[in-house]
Image (spheres, rainbow, N blue to C red):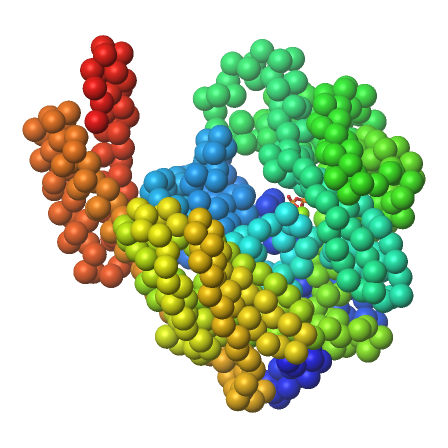
Amino acid sequence: MAKVAINLSTGALQQEEVIVGIDLGTTNSLVAYIHPEDKNAIAINDQGRGTIVPSVVHFPKNGEAIVGTDAKEYLITDPANTIYSVKRLLGKSYGDLGEHKDYFGYKIIDDDSEGLVKIRVGDTFYSPIELSAEILKELRERAEHSLKTPVNRAVITVPAYFNDSQRQATRDAGKLAGLEVLRIVNEPTAAALAYGIGIDPTEEKTIAVYDLGGGTFDISILSIHQGIFEVLSTHGNTYLGGDDMDRAIINHWIQENQLLADTVNEDKHLSQELRLKAEEAKKALSSQQVYIGNISDKINCHLERHTFETMIAPIVAQTIESCRQAMTDANLQPEQIDAVIMVGGSTRVPLVYDTVSDFFGKPANNALNPDEVVALGAAIQADILAGNRKDILLLDVTPLTLGIETMGGLMDSIIPRNSKIPTKAGRQYTTSVDGQVNMKISVYQGERDLVKENRKLAEFDLKGIPAMPAGFPKVDVNFILNADGILKVEAVELRSGTRQEVEVKPQYGLTDEQVEQMLMDSITHAREDVSARMVIEARTTAEQLLYQVERFLEKNGEHLTEEEITLTRTNLQNLRDALPTNDKDTILRAVDTLEEQTSPFAERVMQISIKQAMAGKKIE
Ligand code: ADP
Ligand code: MG
């Protein structure tokens, strides 16, 4: 295993380079770096446009995507082509969205599969990874422009509750933006680092990080010892934040003003302005007692802090309830918390600050800018990884990603590169064919999306899986990487207990130069790798849908009209014809058409079955 300092500082190309820290937020994103002379963390403000880049991507009819404040202008006027809150979709399948499907103003594709969501903009399909990559690219460009140097490496933050697939999606987005992601860091950990907590390895602390952003709230309780940050508990609400305060103000003004109430629904520009004014009022009330403004120069609107506080009291109360829950989960009392850190723009609201300080029984830390604190901490983490802080303990890390092959020859990473060792990670898989009794586990190392470009470490068959329909067996694959860098891979079929394992030494026969080369290749080929992955995923989706619809026609054709059957056959054929094009958009358009046309059928058949059941008839 390589030490971080050696591994990351070899290769002339990389020596002088700055490594940036990125806060990829739901509402706003920022990029920060460590100033080479005074060693302070600074959020980058390129061309005086401010440090905050709204996490909004707009696709104009012609031309390149627009990101940030300029894109935000289109949220109301062109919602179908303007994507916000994409972080909520990262690493998610349509099923994961549940009741929140209607929250989004743009088109999210429901392909009914377990696959990840896609967003349709005109005739093109985007994955949340590609959209996040647009935001990261903008941040990277701003950093390069402002620092006048190429930026190829970054540390990116994610919420502490992000799961494996959300973390992997964030890494992939970075890769697609041309960034080598040295580490994914938890947002609360970054916030603590920004306040200097956890930098001294002898320090032992328990802290609470309260993060109230635009549309999300989370509280994390961390324990810090020997420079290691452990998440004791997290709680929160992924649909609660400053936007809810804005909405409360809008409703209040609409109730007060008949003219507003009458016109706001028809007039898009008016409603856009109303939103902006509500946010302006909220921000103003963070530092003054009264706000007086007007909308379109004709409608007066005013608000007093006291009224505002009454309106938002339920929101604040909900966050405190989460804090209480997180403390219970961590088995701690408020007096056991050494420090409380405020993160997120909405913690500027005085009522929020006071209520949180009251709950924990001590003044919360808010000396740093709450918008910037996560990005600043990410920059500090980047600096540590670059080996610029000699006082910091360097832990052993694994230099290349370890994973297994999944459908279509794709690499599914289990232990991402730069993970501290020893470490253990795993994931559950299932069979793809009915009655499958063997499963091939192929272990690979490397950063490329297709296993054929990576290095094969081992392969074995898990035999003796009881014959079951596809999707039923549950196979746990675990990777255990010990402190000496030996990898043990074990696969267990949970229903039968069938087990098989293998041991390998991933670093055996690999020089530092070869490791560097593998990393470089993954950056050079990022774009083509992601496109190849997307084509494979689109094909898999299409093949599953073809199979489902064909079976449906066989079983339930009698409940459809002649026209419906003919149209379904045509759309099935169009989808079959789309497959050989190997163009993901062509394939997904055909999927979308077939899906939209056939989705009402299932409902209808169900109604008929219910009626038959009620009439005492036998159902199949
Ligand atoms: P996220 O982490 O979700 O991307 P941020 O931390 O950037 O979000 O927080 C954005 C929210 O902070 C917005 O709702 C914004 O209106 C709010 N905000 C920013 N400044 C202030 C302020 N001075 N007073 C109150 N709310 C503010
Ligand atoms: Mg945030």
Establish if 263 lies above or below 205: above
Establish if 251 lies above or below 246: above
Establish if 236 lies above or below 166: above
Please tell me which residue lies in front, 603 or 299: 603
- Is residue 19 found left or right of 430 in the rendered image? right
Residue 351 appears in which quarter of the rendering? top right
- Is residue 537 found left or right of 166 in the rendered image? left
Residue located at (84% from left, 45% from top): 340
Image position, residue 63 (x, y; %): 39, 56
Residue 30 appears in which quarter of the rendering? bottom right
Establish if 157 lies above or below 289: below
Count how many numbered circles sit on residues in the image: 0
Give the quadrant of the C terminus: top left
Residue located at (68% from left, 74% from top): 483
Image position, residue 237 (x, y; %): 64, 35
Residue located at (9% from left, 29% from top): 563
Ligand 1 resides in the quarter of the picture at top right
Please tell me which residue lies in front, 157 or 220: 220
Tell me if I can see residue 101 in this picture: yes
Residue located at (49% from left, 80% from top): 518
Please tell me which residue lies in front, 536 or 583: 536
Image position, residue 93 (x, y; %): 44, 45
- Is residue 565 found left or right of 514 in the rendered image? left
Image position, residue 235 (x, y; %): 69, 39
Tell me if I can see residue 410 in this picture: no
- Is residue 320 found left or right of 14 in the rendered image? right
Give the quadrant of the N terminus: bottom right
